[in-house]
Structures are given as structure tokens and as C-alpha cells.
Image (cartoon, rainbow, N blue to C red):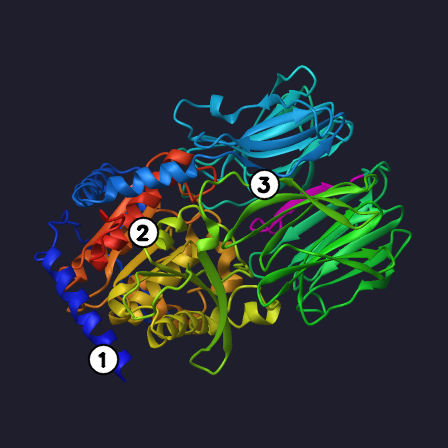
Amino acid sequence: MKKYIFIAMAAILGLYSCNQKQEKMLNYPISQKVDTVDIYHGVEVADPFRWLEDDNSDSTKAWVSKQNKVTNDYLAEIPFRQKIKDRLTEIWDYPKYGMPFKKGDYWYFYKNDGLQPQYVIYRMKTLDGEPELFLDPNTFSEDGTVALSGLSFSKNGKLCTYSLSSGGSDWREIFVMHVESKTKLEDHLKWIKFSGMSWYKDGFYYSRYDEPKEGDELKGVNENSKVFYHKAGTAQSADQLIYEDKENPMFSWNMGTTEDEKYLILSGHNPSARGNSLYFKEADDPKSEFIAIQEDFEHNTWVLDNEGEDIFIMTNKDAPRNRVYKINANDPSETREVIPQTTDVLNNVGMAGGKLLVSYMHDASSKAYVYNLDGSLEHQIKLPAIGSISGFSGDKESNTAFYSFTSFTYPSMTFKYDIKNNKTEVFRKSGIDIDIDQFETKQVFYTSKDGTKVPMFIVHKKGLVLNGTNPTLLYGYGGFNVSLTPYFSISNLVLLENDGVYALPNIRGGGEYGEEWHQGGTQLNKQNVFDDFIAAAEYLIDNGYTSSEKLAIRGGSNGGLLVGACMTQRPELFKVAIPQVGVMDMLRYHKFTIGYYWVPDYGSSDDKIQFENLIKYSPLHNLKARTCYPATMITTADHDDRVVPAHSFKFAAELQSKQSCANPTVIRIETKAGHGAGKSTEKIIEEATDIWSFMFYNMGVEAYPEK
């Protein structure tokens, strides 16, 4: 009883402290309302800020400028903001490496010296050789906003392609380079999105869309996906059209090859279905036709690789936690089970050294094994701790593979694995200069609203007193079969060093327990996701980790929707909300860029039953007047063409008009940035600085106080 009295008193004191800081509401820019009303299945729905969907209009640009001024002025007043930025810059400044991989005569790896805007690619003749600079993306632009988004080598390693993203957009440009001389050829390919670069002989396959109308580059619907073959050294206009589906313009298509280039693999995606179609054909026989492996779009199925005429396939068909089977190219109608479904989720399979290198998820953390090609288990790979393995880098002819391992308190490290002898050794250690042993991780299981048990990782300093006063960040995603497993975050060290708590629940909608867990948080089941997240918050409060006055929630993209839905359903439960690049308008999300591909997870307002479900939780449509919402900082970016910034713009305008208390509602709009990928180190640090500053300030907590 005494503990709960203390928590209640702490909450009262925290509220008083915060209200002292926020005596009056901010002077927000006026967001003009227009008389726009849509009718959905006989229901009128107002959309007064529809004009903010036009990212090219002068009125929207002026609104963005004014909103950023309010936000920047507010953040500039936070007294410890510079301390946070200085500390982040200090701990970020250490060498970071990617896993090495062999192509042709060279070993390649990614490296960032510490604070470089983008990672640099190096190469060396041997693993212990002297590294040589191969490609430096930091030379692509002065401000670091042009990022390397893909790199692919021809089979003989003589040529490579690399793709670039400008300002964080999903649009890609592809260039070709001669590897030995490091000279760029004249090839320049444009209007590519969500495509690999799959080499075959002296060229490669890729997918592209038609050039959008001027002004629609970042918001127009992407359709008519086509597969082309580009021969190195030629113009894009000469590319050979390989595949298109005129009858289904909303479908997307991708072409790949097996490692030995023996087979072509064609994969199709139907935006109305959960899975993909899959076909293969002989690459060297121009008369051969594609043979279907799967046509129904109901399951996720993909080719791992081949061993001669045997093609190995991973699928969740008849196995919601995934399995591996194989077919013979000469008789594909007969399937042979290789690795059957188990109680754990089969997460990743690599083929190297004549073996199958397999990782599983067990309660959202990794286990790794080696199987023979006939499916017999050879041995388990011992991992250094409870954490996450990133997959294996290796090829079929080599007995050496690499994998990266990380956890909340285990900085990412690269391990070298001797496949033949089952021996693991550290290849590169992390150089971070901080005592990681001062922190601890625990996993708990809590009960959601409908009785479902949900796991949650909790990280904090060892010996932290659980008296309900600790600043706490609850982070989540909950969608699209995405699994949130243990990972090391430099940014989160700011929270942990200031006696904070980081909590990561593995809520439904993700893939932590397979396809059933995923579907338990989709379409008409989407409310389960929010219930799971809210129950996680209540667990943290009930068990003394924090209180409502010291609890923040954060998530990006689909996680931004999660935060928006939870803060509108339970505004009193959280002190701070950080919805990032979120899907906030659930009635119109499918009308922009690639949003229609999210219908299998969300449903569509075009359907009456799904509309009635969507409008119940759509963050934009559930903000109510005379309600005190948490202190909220919305983040988005001007080049986000995945979740267009109109979602965040309209949500910010609506929230500012409805907020009834002095809790601030600001929107941070990044320039020359997109959905998140490719962001420079400087921009990442600046954004992290602002998020932690906003969170601590509104909790009445001083970060890095003078001792």
C-alpha cells in the first residue's frame, strides 16, 4: 500500500512540476479550415485540412515554415538540450562496421569512422589485408542527403551497380561502375522504387514505374510496375521489357536470379492479398516459360537458392511459423520437406558451404542452427547472449560465413563462423566507449485486454529503484509481420544514463510468433494492437517502473499510427507522445504513393465493414474537443513518399485545434529527408536530441544535471 501512495504522490508532484513549465498554451499558426466533406457508405466525414495534402502549394509551404518556427523556438528554450546533443555526439563517435562479403577477387565491407554522414565501402584482397576505399557516398552531396541505398555485383565481380536515394525519397537512381578501375560508366537509370538489382551475365534485372506527372513525384499513386533487363554500358531507353501485367496495374513485380544464374525467379505482389505469387524458369533457354511455384497470393513464399536442379523454398503456406521445402526443376509438382515447422518461428535461412544456416525466433530472440541440405540437424551455433542475429553472409563455395549479433546491452559485433568445423570467433568488436555492464535487460510477460500473454523487454540501470518516478519510453510497432527483437541503440543510452527505462513489447500485428500473431493484429483485429500497447503501459505503472506523468510512447510509420491511436483512446495514460512519420488518416491512406499495399493489414474505407472499423481508431478522426492530450511532438519529413507528410500535417492541425490544456503540440518537419532510410548521422543526432529534450522537459526531468 505504501508503494502505491508514493507513486500517487510522485505523480501529483510531477504534474505540478510540468504545469509550472507550461503555464500557457503555445501560440500556434492558424490552420485554415475548409468545407470538405466525404461520404463513406452514407456517413459524412469532414476533412477540414484537406488542403495540406498538396505539398507543392504556397499555403502548405507557408504553414510548414510557421510550424517549424514554433517548434524550433520551443525546443531552443529547453536548458539541457545542448547537453543531450553533446553527449550523443560523444558516444556516437566510434568506428562502426558492416559484415564483410566476397565478390570476385575482393572482400568488401561498410564502415563509418564515427560521425561520417554515410557509411563508406572498402575492399581488400584478403580478410586480413589492407583496406582500400572503394565507394564513398559522402561525396555524392555536400550535406549528406544523397544516400547509397543498394549495391550489387556481377557474378564475376567485374561490374557493380549502386542505387542512390535523394533526400530520403523511395525513388532510386541506378548507376554502373567498373570494379577494378572504380570508374563510373554512362549508365543512368531512373524512376525505380522497391526494386533489387539482380545481375545476369553482363546486365541486370530491375523493376520501375512510369515517370510521374510533374508535382506528383512524392504523392502520386505508383502503378504499372514493369520488369526490365539492362545491359551494362547502354542507355535506359534501350532496356528490354521482360514482364508487365496490363490487366493488373496495381500489382508489382520483381525479378531475381539464383546465385549460379541458372534460374530466373519472378515474384508478384497483389495489394489486396497477404502473400505473393512465385515463378521460375531456365535462365539460359529463351524458349522456356515461367513455371508456377505459387499463384494464389495467399502466402509468403520465396526462393532461397538452388543446389543443381533442386530449388530450396521458404514459405508460410501450411506453416504459419514457416518451413523449408524443395522442388526439382524437372518435376516441380512434387515437393519434399526439408525443415518442417517447429514451435519457434523460422526467421532466416542462408545457404553457404553446402549447408543451411538457419535462425529462429524464440520469444522474440534468436537461436541459430546448421542443417544439412537433406534437412538433418548438424549442430547449434552458440550465440553470446540473448539477442538478435542479423542473418548470414556467405556463398555456396565457401566454408566461411559471417553474422552480426546485437542486444539491448550488447553493441553490434561481427562474428566469423567456420561452417565445416563449427567454430565461431569474433571478427570485429564494437569500439563504443561506455560501460555497457551497468545496464540490464529482463523479459516479462503481461496480460492484454482479451487475456493474451504478450512478452516485453525492459532495459534500465542495474539496481534502479522502482518507485514509479523513472522517466520511461514505451516503444512499439505492431504490424506488417515485422518483428521487434533486441537491438543496441546509441540514442537510447541518453535515456538509460538518466535513470530511465526503455520498454519494448512484442505486440500483435508483428511476426514474433508467426503469421497467426500477425493476423491477430490486422484489419478487424487491429484494436488488439492498441490494447496490447495500452496493457504494456499499465503493466509498467502497476509494477512501479513509472507513472503516467513519467511515461512517453513512441513509434514510427505503422508505429506512428499506434501512438496516435493510443493517445486518442487513453490520453490520460501518457505524459508524452512521439508519433513519427505516422499513418494518421486511415480513410485516405491508400490514395497516396504505395499506400494501397497496406490494405491487407488495415482494410480499406472503400469497404463498408472495414470503414466502420477504421473510423473507430483512425487518429485523425478520433481527436475530441475539450480533451487534454499528452505533450506531443509529431515528426515527419518533406521527402517522405512512403507515408506522405500530409498524414502528420493534418493530424497536427487537428490536434492543435482540439487540445484543451497547456501540453504542447508541435510538429517537427525535417527537410531533405524521407521516411527514415538514408538519413545522415548529423540529422539522426539532431532528431534524437530534440526527441529526448522534448520528452524529459515535459516530464519535468532534467537530463544530465550538474553533480
Task: Say whether residue 673 is visible.
Answer: no
User: Is 365 situated left or right of 626 in this image?
Assistant: right
Q: Are marks 3 and 2 in contact (CB under 8 Å)?
A: no
Classify mark 3: helix, strand or loop: loop
Residue beneath disc 3: 429
Residue beneath disc 2: 648
Which numbered disc flags the more N-terminal residue, 1 or 3?
Answer: 1
Which numbered disc flags the more N-terminal residue, 2 or 1?
Answer: 1
User: Is 286 situated left or right of 647 in this image?
Assistant: right
Q: What amino acid is at disc 1? A: Ile
Q: Which residues are magenta?
A: 245-259
Residue beneath disc 1: 5
Instruction: Using the image, tell me which numbered label, if any, was put on residue 559.
Output: none
Report, in whole angstroms, how far the alpha carbon at label 3 lies from the one at label 2. 40 Å
Report, in whole angstroms, how far the alpha carbon at label 1 lies from the one at label 3. 46 Å
Classify mark 2: helix, strand or loop: helix
Q: What amino acid is at disc 2? A: Ser
Viewer-side label of 3, 2: 3
